[in-house]
Image: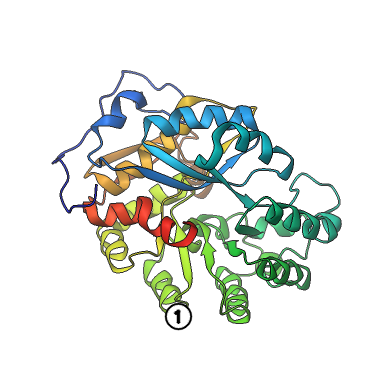
Amino acid sequence: MTDSTMPSLAGYQPALHRAPISDANRLGIDYRAEAPRLPYRGEVWDCHVHLRNLASARAYMQAAEVYGTKRVWSMTPLEEVDAIRDEFGKRIAFIAVPDYWATDWLHAMGDDWLRRIEAFAKKGVKVCKFWAAPRGLDKWDQMWIDSPIRLRSMRLARELGMTLMVHVADPDTWFATKYADAGKYGTKRDHYARFERMLAMFPDADWWAAHMAGSPEDLDFLQGLLDRWPRLRVDTSATKWMVRELSKHADVLRDFLARNPGRVMFGTDIVADPANLSFDLFASRFWALRALLETDYDGPSPIVDPDLSMVDPSLPKESTAHLRGASVDAATLTDVYVGACRGLLG
């Protein structure tokens, strides 16, 4: 779809069963039946998933097909790339990641990471991920985005012509709870100050910041970041977080997306792990994000959001966030679903 019209879907409500099915489906939605009811008719590219192995990729692709997702970029262990590529070809591309399961993080983020970056590049991988969530500091105190060991691997990735992808900061809810110790974790703004130092060090690089650059709560701040760094793009991944925070200012989100063509890419952050290959788990992420972007739905999210009861212990553990759709126009949706991703990743 490339025009500015879509089928009208005023007052959208999903058809519901009588009882919750799982933590990914507290409303009892038939996700297969709802997919064709969503108004957008074009294809979708998902730029942010985690497919652990071939079985995980097969399970994920079942939900992806139902929701019109034609191309995917996955953070997959190096050792699993060939098997997935042999089956899915160019439909699934890859993002270089370190060995997150290693016990020796000095090695995993040092020499072994350099070796993996080069091996990913030899396989044609064009994006390198630098995970700098504050919780990484629980594993190792060198997980800041601007630590010297991180800088060493960024330099190698740039020498190999890779886009630099980052996870910086985390939800405001976590800084109010999990990261309340600012002496250990820093403030949220501390993480952005370090990130902007890296942006300045590599001004000729294409940058990609996951999870709306960690700032769906404050789109004015995010706009300033995009304005200062014209080679920076963001994605919509981390569905529970995006639904919870972007629904609070859906009208602002709609204007923000229209103001930033080519800068916001669609991503779900689905983790397809052999331990959990539930169709509803994967489909819930597609449905919730697409309902947020495409419809005027105004009601509960179907996905249990643990942050709600963490911040307010009086709430039930199975609480879900409120989802308020932004009803984004078709031209902007086409840019978010395909155009921005094509502009960066081809």
188 to the left or right of 41: right
105 to the left or right of 67: right
Q: Which amino acid does label 1 sit on?
A: Arg
One can see residue 132 in this view:
no
One can see residue 195 in this view:
yes
Tell me if residue 59 comes above or below residue 237 in the rendering.
above
169 to the left or right of 28: right
Determine which residue is flagged by label 1.
228
> What secondary structure is marked by label 1?
helix
Residue 322: horizontal and vertical position, in percent?
Answer: 34, 44
Q: Which of 116 and 133 is in front in this view?
A: 116
Residue 223: horizontal and vertical position, in percent?
Answer: 39, 72
Picture quadrant where residue 21 is located: top left
Residue sitting at x 71%, y 54%: 122
Tell me if residue 197 comes above or below residue 174 in the rendering.
below
Residue 19: horizontal and vertical position, in percent?
Answer: 36, 19
Q: Which of 57 and 18 is in front in this view?
A: 57
77 to the left or right of 331: right
**Mark 1 burial class by Cα count in 10 Å: few <14, some 14-19, many 20+:** few
Q: Which of 21 and 88 is in front in this view?
A: 88
Residue 277: horizontal and vertical position, in percent?
Answer: 56, 26
Picture quadrant where residue 114 is located: bottom right
Q: How many marks?
A: 1
Tell me if residue 79 comes above or below residue 160 in the rendering.
above
